Every structure is written in structure tokens, then in C-alpha cells.
Image: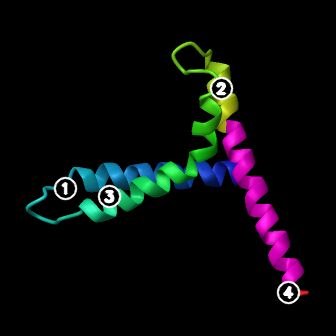
Amino acid sequence: MFAALFWLVYQALNGLIFLFGHLPPHWVHLDWPLRMLGLVCRALTFPRRILRHLWPSETSPAFVLWLLAALNWLLWGVLVEAMRSLRARRKS
């Protein structure tokens, strides 16, 4: 469930970047929001980018890339659950 939600959020952010990037600059100036959305997207894929350096993508088979994506979702899921459990402990 978390992986699907993570993927949907990531795709929505990429869609917003694509949409905002194609608006005419004389109509609305969106450089700053585009940079912030780009930073959020890079932060969401940080674990995957670190893991991809273990095996360069040009020589890696497709299953390795899928495995790295799943590990990225797993790492973020563990982080979210750890934060949730810490918050629950602090409340009780």
C-alpha cells in the first residue's frame, strides 16, 4: 500500500513539474516552485540514487532497476513507520 501511494505522489510531482515547465514564462514566472518541486522529487528518490551507484544503469539488467525502486520504497516505508512509532511513544 505504501509503495503504491509513494509511486502516486512521485508521479504527481513529476506531472506538476512537467505541467509547470510548459507554461509560458511571460504568463507566469514559476522558476522557484519548479526548483522546489525538483528538490522534493530528488529527496524522494535519494535512497534509490545511492543504491544505483552500486551498479551503473547502463550495464544493469532491468530486474536490478526494479529491485532498486522497490528498495527505495521499502526504505521510505521503514522511515515513515519508525517516525510514527516514535511519535506514538512520545504521546504515551
Q: CA distance from mark 2 to mark 4?
A: 40 Å
From the viewer's perspective, is residue 88 above or below residue 23?
Answer: below
Quarter of the rendering occupied by the C terminus = bottom right
The residue beneath circle 2 is: 54
The number of callouts visible is 4
Type of the residue with mark 2: Leu
Percent across and percent down for residue 13 are 44, 55
Q: Is 81 on the left-hand or right-hand side of 70? A: right
What residue is shown at x 40% (from left), y 58% (from top)? 37
Q: CA distance from mark 1 to mark 2?
A: 37 Å
Q: Give the secondary structure at mark 3.
A: helix
The range drawn in magenta is: 70-91
State which mark lies toward you, 1 or 2: 2
Type of the residue with mark 1: Leu
Give the residue at the far left of this rendering: 26
Q: CA distance from mark 2 to mark 3?
A: 29 Å
Q: Which mark is residue 34?
A: 3
What residue is shown at x 67% (from left), y 43% (from top)? 72
Percent across and percent down for residue 12 are 46, 54
First in sequence: mark 2 vs mark 3:
3
Q: Which mark is residue 78?
A: none
Q: Give the secondary structure at mark 1.
A: loop
Q: Give the secondary structure at mark 2.
A: loop
The residue beneath circle 1 is: 23
The residue beneath circle 4 is: 91
State which mark lies toward you, 2 or 3: 2
Percent across and percent down for residue 76 are 70, 53
Q: CA distance from mark 3 to mark 4?
A: 37 Å
Say whether marks 4 and 1 touch (CB < 8 Å).
Answer: no
